Every structure is written in structure tokens, then in C-alpha cells.
């Protein structure tokens, strides 16, 4: 049997946050951390869909000598609570991350973001700009989607999407292979770890809701949030930024990289021509190198 827990030996911590602004009910946001809590710098790792903090295990293990390292699970993901009735929107996830940063009183934060973690992380940084000083950016977007990949569009068909994502777990399972280019396959322990929190219909709620939250019209709230993020990134034009980009990503294609570089013109980019979407799984060594370099800057 695959033993993914040996790859993720970190102590679970939880932050209780309001389920909504109008509710007294609480939900638990899960995170893990390594390194010295009193370190002058913090690396905050923000995952996308359908991953969780497990994908940042090498950062947690190998950068803790240089900084405090925290990896969070969005509500509905990883080991966080998975409420079935919840506002699973970009704006909500941004607010949750900002609350974590404030509650833990994080300063001198280097945000390491991937996939949905990009707009969530950038959105939180725009709320708390004095707390975030640097960025390491993996394949993501910070603007309304310029296109919709067919594989994603099919998952948005209500009856088909729910059957595939929540019923058969196809979104998370196919991601174990469709996100790769450099590697022929993931090690069994790694593959098991990536999908471990998503073992049933109930636990796959956020995977489905992330897909549904991808906006296609300017009138949609998440389109407007992404537009504000795109316009706001000029605030970070003078901050150190390193981009590590898998050029074989069919979801966040190279034109997304070009657009990110325009928004963050002082960024240093490392193009990985044989890497797909799961950058942390195929190119952890390169990401760790860039995290170390930006911490030293």
C-alpha cells in the first residue's frame, strides 16, 4: 500500500474562521509549518485545484533552515473542513488567506503560489500589502481567463461535471497524469498523497466548486475580482518576483506567462521547457533554488 503519510510528517494546525460574515458558525482552516516561528522571513505556500499543502512538502522540508515555512489548505481542500453549504468563491478564499496572515501576524512574507493559489495569494497580498514582500510564482493567472480549455469546459457541464468530479473523482485522478511532461508518472506514494483528502463525493465538493467558479462573463463576481487583481498588481512592481513556469502546461499556457510578466515587469523567469502543470511535482529542485535565491535578495 502506498505510504503517503511518510512524505507528509508535519503536525496539523487549525485556524477557526467564521463560516460567513453573517454566521456564528466556524470552520477549520488547516495548515502546517516548519522552521523557526521567530524567523525574520516567512514562505507562505498557496495551492490550487485539485491539490493541497501536500504538494509543497519539499519546500516545507528543505527551506525551513532559511525561513519559517507555512502551507495552507483552502476550505474544502486537503485537511481543512469541507462544508457542503459554503461560499466557495475566489473572494471567500482570499478573505480566508488574509485572515490567516493576520491571525498568525505574518510579516516579510514570500508568497509561493500555484494555479488558483495565484489569484488567492495576490488578492490577499493586495489586502495586506505591507505584510507581503516577495513572490515566487508558478503556473497561474492573475486576470480573467482568456480562454477555457475543453477539458475544463466539459467539467463545467452541471450533470456531467458533478458525475465526473464528485462521483468518479476524474478531475483529481486524471490530473495525476495530464499535468506531467518531464515525468512519465508519479511515484505511487506521491500520487496517493495528492488525492488522499478527496476519497468520496462529500470530500470533493471544493474541487467541483473551483471549476464552477471560473468566470466566463464580465458580470460575474469572480471576473470582477480577477480584474481588480490584475489592475492592482502594479502595487508590487518594485517587489522581488521569481517565476518558475512549466512550458508544457495545457491549462496555463505560455501566453499566460507573457501576461504575468507584463504585470510584474521586474520578475526573473525560469522557463522549464519539459515541465507541465504540476511544477512542484516535476521541478521541486528548481523551485527550491528560486525560493532560496529570493529569500537571500
Image: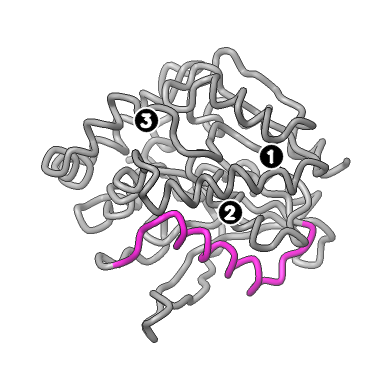
For mark 3, give the secondary structure: helix
Q: Which residue is mark 2?
A: 123
Number of disc labels: 3
- Percent coordinates x, y for residue 228 in the rendering: 56, 50
* Mark 3 to mark 1 CA distance (whole Å): 23 Å
- Tell me whether the residue at label 2 lies in contact with that at label 3, contact meaning CB atoms closer than 8 angstroms: no
Residue 297 in view: yes
Q: Is residue 144 left or right of residue 69?
A: left
Q: Which residue is mark 3?
A: 176
Front tag of 1 and 2: 2
Neighbor class of circle 2 (other Cα within 10 Å; few <14, some 14-19, many 20+) is: many
Q: Which residues are magenta?
A: 86-108
Q: Is residue 246 left or right of residue 214?
A: right
Q: Is residue 39 left or right of residue 156?
A: right
Q: Nearer the viewer, residue 130 or 193?
A: 130
Residue 289 in view: no
Q: Nearer the viewer, residue 248 or 69?
A: 248
Tell me the residue at 87%/42% (across/down): 296
Amino acid at each position: 500500500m502506498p505510504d503517503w503519510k511518510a512524505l507528509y510528517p508535519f503536525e496539523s494546525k487549525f485556524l477557526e474562521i467564521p463560516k460567513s460574515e453573517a454566521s456564528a458558525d466556524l470552520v477549520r482552516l488547516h495548515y502546517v509549518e516548519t522552521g523557526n516561528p521567530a524567523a525574520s522571513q516567512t514562505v507562505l505556500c498557496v495551492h490550487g485545484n485539485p491539490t493541497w499543502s501536500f504538494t509543497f512538502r519539499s519546500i516545507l522540508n528543505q527551506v525551513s533552515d532559511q525561513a519559517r515555512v507555512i502551507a495552507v489548505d483552502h476550505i474544502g481542500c486537503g485537511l481543512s473542513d469541507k462544508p457542503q453549504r459554503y461560499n466557495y468563491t475566489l473572494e471567500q478564499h482570499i478573505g480566508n488567506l488574509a485572515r490567516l496572515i493576520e491571525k498568525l501576524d505574518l510579516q516579510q512574507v514570500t508568497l509561493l503560489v500555484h494555479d488558483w493559489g495565484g489569484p488567492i495569494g495576490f488578492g490577499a497580498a493586495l489586502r495586506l500589502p505591507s505584510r507581503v514582500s516577495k513572490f515566487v510564482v508558478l503556473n497561474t493567472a492573475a486576470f480573467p481567463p482568456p480562454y477555457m480549455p475543453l477539458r475544463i469546459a466539459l467539467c463545467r457541464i452541471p450533470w456531467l461535471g458533478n458525475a465526473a468530479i464528485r462521483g468518479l473523482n476524474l478531475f483529481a485522478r486524471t490530473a495525476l497524469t495530464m499535468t506531467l511532461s518531464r515525468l512519465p508518472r508519479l511515484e505511487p506514494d506521491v500520487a496517493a498523497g495528492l488525492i488522499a483528502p478527496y476519497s468520496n463525493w462529500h470530500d470533493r465538493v471544493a474541487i467541483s466548486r473551483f471549476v464552477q467558479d471560473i468566470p466566463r462573463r464580465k458580470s460575474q463576481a469572480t471576473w470582477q475580482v480577477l480584474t481588480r487583481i490584475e489592475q492592482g498588481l502594479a502595487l508590487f512592481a518594485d517587489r522581488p518576483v521569481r517565476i518558475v513556469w512549466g512550458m508544457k502546461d495545457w491549462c496555463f499556457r505560455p501566453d499566460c506567462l507573457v501576461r504575468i510578466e507584463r504585470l510584474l515587469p521586474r520578475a526573473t523567469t525560469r522557463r522549464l521547457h519539459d515541465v507541465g502543470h504540476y511544477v512542484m511535482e516535476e521541478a521541486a529542485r528548481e523551485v527550491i533554488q528560486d525560493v532560496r535565491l529570493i529569500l537571500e535578495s
